């Protein structure tokens, strides 16, 4: 599926999210730490997050491929090892 070109920058205000008081005055490192802590709170309840239909379709396609030919599957640790050999 082709992606649409972006029109301008993304802004927090687009989704109606107010910036926390004092956020801009934090160092970039502290802003990142804040966001990591926020993400950790969100991640505590992953079952509450909606799964996009495109992700579900992809999982179904890959499961069907596996069921057609399980011999083509590689263990995850091998894939990760290969990825580590080729840094970006």
Image (cartoon, rainbow, N blue to C red):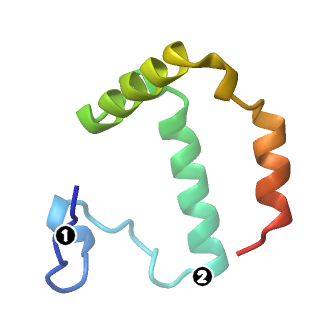
Residue on which disc 2 sits: 28
Residue 4: horizontal and vertical position, in percent?
16, 70
Mark 2 or mark 1: name the one nearer the start of the chain.
1
| For residue 84, side relative to residue 31 (left or right) | right
Say which of 22 and 85 sits in front. 85
Quadrant including the C terminus: bottom right
| For residue 41, side relative to residue 81 (left or right) | left
Say which of 5 and 35 sits in front. 5
Residue 51: horizontal and vertical position, in percent?
33, 31
Quadrant including the N terminus: bottom left
Q: Quadrant of residue 14?
A: bottom left
- Spatial CA distance of label 2 from label 1 is 20 Å
Say which of 23 and 75 sits in front. 75
Q: Residue at x 22, y 65 (%)?
A: 3
Q: Residue at x 78, y 30 (%)?
A: 75
Residue 33 lies, with reference to residue 41, above or below; the image says below
Residue on which disc 1 sits: 13
Residue 36 lies, with reference to residue 58, above or below; the image says below
Q: Residue at x 38, y 65 (%)?
A: 20
Residue 16 lies, with reference to residue 40, above or below; the image says below
Residue 67: horizontal and vertical position, in percent?
52, 13
Is disc 1 surrounded by few (<14), some (14 to 19) or many (20+) residues within 10 Å?
few
Say which of 53 and 78 sits in front. 78
Residue 53 in view (yes/no): yes
Q: What is the secondary structure assignment of the residue under circle 2?
A: helix
Residue 87 lies, with reference to residue 24, above or below; the image says above
The total number of labels drawn is 2
């Amino acid at each position: 599926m082709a992606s649409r070109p972006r029109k301008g920058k993304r802004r927090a205000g687009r989704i109606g999210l107010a910036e926390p008081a004092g956020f801009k005055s934090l160092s970039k490192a502290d802003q990142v730490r804040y966001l990591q802590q926020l993400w950790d709170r969100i991640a505590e309840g992953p079952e509450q997050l909606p799964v996009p239909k495109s992700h579900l379709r992809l999982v179904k396609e890959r499961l069907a491929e596996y069921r057609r030919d399980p011999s083509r599957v590689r263990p995850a640790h091998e894939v990760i090892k290969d990825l580590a050999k080729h840094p970006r």
